[in-house]
Amino acid sequence: MSIDHGKRSSSGFDRPKKSLGQNFLNDQRVVQDIVLCADIEACDAVIEVGPGRGAMTGKLAERAGLVIAVEIDRDLIPGLEELAAVYGNIVIIHGDILKLDVEKDIVEKYVRPEGLSRVKVCANLPYYITTPIVMKFLEECPGLIDDLVIMVQKEVAERMTAGPGGKDYGAMTVTVDYFTEPAIQFIVPPHCFYPRPGVDSAVVKLIMRKTPPFELKDKDYFFKVVKAAFLQRRKTLANALSNSPLTGVTSGEVTEALERMGINPLARGETLSGGEFAELSNILLASKK
Ligand code: SAM
């Protein structure tokens, strides 16, 4: 069940832009499966990042109360406006998702006036900016959006959902786990896109947590500790954290904190769970004062 991406005009429609991460979905069944995973109802507003040629946009609009589709490529806007005119519940924003204020520019402007109760994100993301887009939604949108169903590179999906101890486990895992409950839904091979990406992809569902999974004395400091631990992931935690300008602690303070927690001071960051990073950052913060 392939999607027809045939030539439409001389506007550039027929020439995907690699620089904008344009790998258009070419398989109707994958589109259907993504939309099913998103579990969309008429009371939902869906933010679609990068609607492209609209492969998913119409399907989302068939189920949602409103679809707000944010596309950076001017050449794709006329085709998307045509689609919006057919459905009547699609808003097209020509812009860069990273520069928009999700609350002010999307939720307050379009979602609240419609009285829609839930906001979801659903997207086949441009891979060159996957991390900043995901981080933007996680950091800016707790309490604002309910979940994200996103297509990402398979290896990114594996990093988002990894458990402690393995090579995929890192700062992204701990961050995603702090804000959401993540789960890989299914793998999508390159032939489902036009043009074909050089890697496998995966659809991930991130359900935003209503309450944080552990108590933090200082959220910013927690993320600094996590970042410092994985910037030098081959080093012991005592070395990685004491050699970083992010944390402001000595090797002795880290060792003492880990001993207090019953963790071997020679441990590396990749062995600590999110909860253990939370406890460590709370203790280190107290010892700094
Ligand atoms: N949703 C379409 C599909 O599945 O066929 C297109 C997906 S394609 C992987 C990514 C889309 O994101 C492209 O249309 C690209 O132009 C758009 N895009 C890239 N950077 C963007 C940004 N910063 N803000 C909004 N859209 C962006």
Image: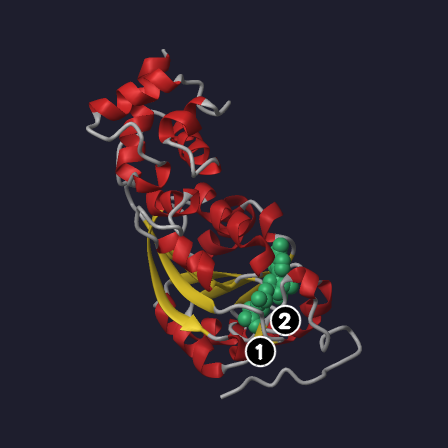
Task: From this view, report whether residue 154 is shown above or below residue 101.
Answer: below
Question: From this viewpoint, which residue is outermost toward the right?
Answer: 10
What amino acid does circle 1 point to?
A: Val
* Image mark for residue 97: none
Viewport quadrant of the C terminus:
top left
Residue at point 60%, 56% (across, down):
128
Task: From this view, report whether residue 27 is shown above or below residue 178.
Answer: below
CB atoms of marks 1 and 2 within 8 Å: no
Q: Position of residue 129 (x, y in %)?
A: 58, 53
Q: Position of residue 251 (x, y in %)?
A: 38, 19
Q: Is residue 119 left or right of residue 24?
A: left
Q: Is residue 121 visible?
A: no
Q: Which residue is mark 1?
A: 86
Q: Secondary structure at mark 1?
A: helix
User: How far apart, in angstroms, are the residues tagged by discs 1 and 2?
Assistant: 10 Å
Task: From this view, report whether residue 267 is shown above or below residue 146.
Answer: above
Ligand 1 appears in which quadrant?
Answer: bottom right
Question: From this viewpoint, which residue is outermost toward the top?
Answer: 289
Q: Position of residue 218 (x, y in %)?
A: 37, 26
- Label 2 crowd (10 A; few <14 / some 14-19 / many >=20): many
Task: Select label 1 or label 2 by which is in front.
Answer: 2
The disc, 1 or 2, on the residue closer to the chain's N-terminal end is 2
Q: Secondary structure at mark 2?
A: helix
Question: From this viewpoint, which residue is outermost toward the bottom?
Answer: 1
Q: Which residue is mark 2?
A: 80
